[in-house]
Image: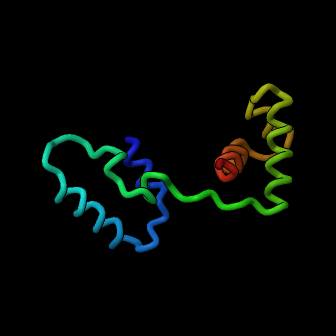
Amino acid sequence: MEVLRALERHPWPGNVSELAHLVRSLAERRRVTGPVRRAELPDPVREGPAPRPLSPMEHAERTAILEALRRPGGNKARTAAALGIGRATLYRKLRSYRG
């Protein structure tokens, strides 16, 4: 599962051909059965994409959201309502600010 998440997070700049090459490479190097371990993935895939720096507006929004989240003790439904946004939007914004 951890390997699948790493593969999904990677931006794949070489598109499908880069992914296909990695899968072929992993399959060719396998000498034993069992799932692929995260340690077998190349560094850029294993480590995930580097977090991009936030713009000043994103940083201010992140700060406001985190402060609003603190007030009701981390309750995301109440935070979203207080901010006038949907919970899905709140979750998406929190995910985008990770890192």
Q: Is residue 42 left or right of residue 77?
A: left
Q: How many marks?
A: 0
Residue 43 placed where, x, y %? Answer: 42, 56
Is residue 79 shown above or below 96? above
Seen at 86% across and 45% down, the residue is 64
Residue 41 placed where, x, y %? Answer: 35, 53
Quadrant of the image containing the N terminus? top left
Is residue 72 shown above or below 55? above
Seen at 86% across and 53% down, the residue is 60
Report the colour scheme. Answer: rainbow
Residue 42 placed where, x, y %? Answer: 37, 58
Seen at 44% across and 48% down, the residue is 5
Residue 34 placed where, x, y %? Answer: 20, 40
Extreme-left residue of the structure? 31
Q: Is residue 32 left or right of residue 93?
A: left
Locate residue 86: give its quadrant.
top right
Q: Is residue 31 left or right of residue 47?
A: left
Is residue 98 shown above or below 18? above
Seen at 34% across and 65% down, the residue is 19
In the image, 67 versus 54, the foreground residue is 54
Is residue 20 shown above or below 62? below
